[in-house]
Amino acid sequence: MFILVIILSVAFAVVNGAHDAANAIATVVGTRVLSPIKAVSMAAVMNLIGAATGLAVASTIGKGIVSSDYITVNVIVAALVAAIVWEFITLRIGIPVSGTHSLIAGLIGAGISQAGSGAIEWSVLTHKVLPFVVISPAIGFAAGYTVMLIVLWLCRHTSPLKVEARFSKLQILSASFMAYSHGRNDGQMPIGLITVAWMLYETGKVSTGMELHPPIWIILVSATAIACGTAFGGWRVIRTLGMRMTALRPVQGFSAETAAASVIATSSVFGIPVSTTHCMTASIMGVGSTKRLSAVKWGVARSIVVGWIVTFPICILIGWLITKLIIAVS
């Protein structure tokens, strides 16, 4: 079962990396600053670096959702299956849903199925996770709108050609920052789960006050997996964010990436597993709204938001069912 956790964690990291490649490179591809191949290569490297930096989010995911007294390998396996299934389906149809929320919902469903509602750390969910389901997109939208206005004001006396040339170079830096932030937040999730499974394998339990100290091989395996997933690229999701949501030029792409990456990086410091997808999508909406509200294709935005809403109930249900199935056959 420990080996199964490793395999599923790697699979989740790969699917998550492919799905969320759009967060890092959709705008830089949509503005044609980088070719798709160069963009995913850059994002893969920065995801690798980000995933290997810090453990705050890994700790929240590993032993902050399901209580240490009730976390089992069965729960981890069921949560991973739920997240993988949902992310794979939405990757195929091009809807940018949150891998973070898919996994958290899977953990909730699996934990309840294993030991009832008492297995869930509701205080962590209500203070550190669920509020940011709403707050992070709102902040992402506001940040994208604000950064875009600041950039427009700073460049008000600069010719459009010079602005285009400057931000074509700056956008490479902002896309790199976005990829790094994604790795540091989403890339921590498989690290947390494999580490908890490893602790259960070694000692048979996870104490409430026990700190996560993953061996270097767990960090490298998880970081490499999410980097490989990013290298594959989720092209349908990339088209949705980078080309279908709103028309983007390098200056808009820079503003959206800088705003979203700043929100994600700040959250990672405090161990808050926010949705990089929500932040980036909302930031693009905010940037597009500085032109006019009609510049954003709200029909596309509406279908994305529907995907966000149904993620929790669907993944909770899958996690619950998979746990029941494991218990029945074991």
Image: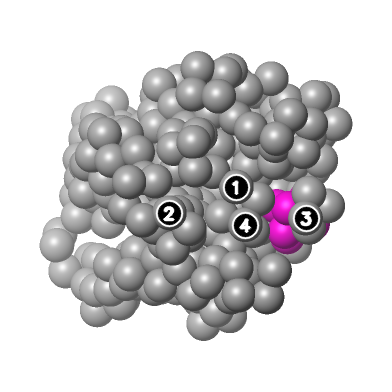
Q: How crowded is mark 4: few (under 14 residues within 10 Å), some or many (20 or more)?
A: many
Q: Are marks 1 and 3 in contact (CB under 8 Å)?
A: no
Give the vertical position of 317 relative to 60 (above or below): below
Query: Is residue 309 part of the magenta span, yes or no?
Result: no
Closer-to-camera residue (129/327): 327
Residue drawn at (77%, 55%), measured in percent from left and top? 1
Give the CA distance from mark 4 to mark 1: 5 Å
Which stretch is magenta?
5-11
The answer to which image quadrant residue 251 occupies is top left
Give the CA distance from mark 1 to mark 3: 10 Å
Report the side of 68 relative to 139 (left or right): right
Give the CA distance from mark 4 to mark 3: 8 Å
Q: Which amino acid does label 1 sit on?
A: Thr
Q: Which mark is residue 1?
A: 3
The answer to which image quadrant residue 295 occupies is bottom left
Give the CA distance from mark 2 to mark 1: 10 Å
**Residue at the spot of label 4:** 74
In terms of secondary structure, what is the magenta stretch mainly?
A: helix
Give the CA distance from mark 4 to mark 2: 11 Å
Give the CA distance from mark 2 to mark 3: 19 Å
**Residue 265 percent coordinates (x, y):** 45, 28
Closer-to-camera residue (60/32): 60
**Residue at the spot of label 1:** 72
**Residue at the spot of label 2:** 115
Q: Is residue 100 visible?
A: yes
Q: What residue type is labelled 3?
A: Met
Q: Which of marks 2 and 1 is nearer the N terminus?
A: 1
Closer-to-camera residue (248/162): 248
Q: Which of marks 2 and 3 is nearer the N terminus?
A: 3
Q: What residue type is labelled 2?
A: Ala
Q: Which amino acid does label 4 sit on?
A: Asn
